[in-house]
Amino acid sequence: MTTIKLIKNGPYMVEGDDVKVFDWDSQQYAVAKHPFYLCRCGASTNKPFCDGTHSKIGFKAAEAAVSGSGDKPAR
Amino acid sequence: MTTIKLIKNGPYMVEGDDVKVFDWDSQQYAVAKHPFYLCRCGASTNKPFCDGTHSKIGFKAAEAAVSGSGDKPAR
């Protein structure tokens, strides 16, 4: 399973054994470690990865999920 | 396998049978369909999902992967 967890006012944290990241030409990005963090604010200088710029620009993104609206988690 | 493909100057396209999206409180977002698109420009009004705002704001994000730098794709 792959999980994408939103960091509040920050990036996507991606966890999973079998997840790959590609550009629009289907070239694969090297992912140095897991989990990894993908830019969500649009301002990283190391896109698609997070470089912490969200903090500097005051990125606000706190749209929480509605409780119970997701799929039932696997148990 | 989960694949995250960057749309040039646009969102992340996420494909996979077993991928879930959570907020910082571990509440799961409902994903209506697959693949789905996660905001990458920081300006969607429907975060974490893309609503097309990247086009309106002129989001530029064209950092391609370096050829051959990724893991070897599974065959």
Image (tube, coloured by chain):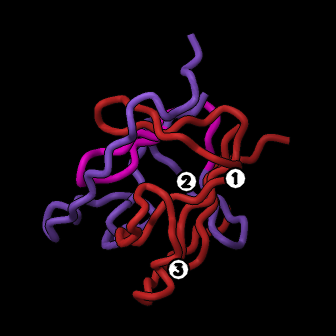
Chain colours: A red, B purple
Residue B8 locus on image (x, y percent): 25, 47
Residue A12 lies in the magenta stretch? no
Tag 3: amino acid: Asn
Q: Residues within 10 Å of mark 1 (few under 14, many from 20)?
A: some
For residue A23, above or below residue B49: above
The numbered mark 2 sits on a residue in which chain? Answer: B
Identity, as a three-letter code, of the amino acid under mark 2:
Ala
**Magenta span has B17?**
yes
Left/right placement of residue B26 relative to residue B53 reads right
Q: Is residue A19 above or below residue B43?
A: above
For disc 2, the marked residue is: B30
Q: Secondary structure at mark 1?
A: loop
Q: Mark 1 belongs to which subunit? A: A
Mark 3 or 1: the one toward you: 1
Name the secondary structure under disc 2.
Answer: loop
For residue B18, say whether it is visible. Answer: yes
Q: Is residue B43 left or right of residue B55?
A: right
The answer to whether tags 3 and 1 share a subunit is yes
Q: Position of residue A3 (x, y in %)?
A: 66, 49
Which amino acid is tagged 1?
A: Pro
Locate the N terminus of chain A and report the quarter of the image it occupies: top right
Placement of the C terminus of chain A among the 4 image quadrants: top right
**Badge 2 and badge 1 in a common chain:** no
Residue shown at 45%/84% (left/top)? A60
Q: In the rendered structure, which segment of residues is drawn in magenta?
A: B4-20
Mark 3 — residue?
A: A9
Disc 1 marks which residue? A35
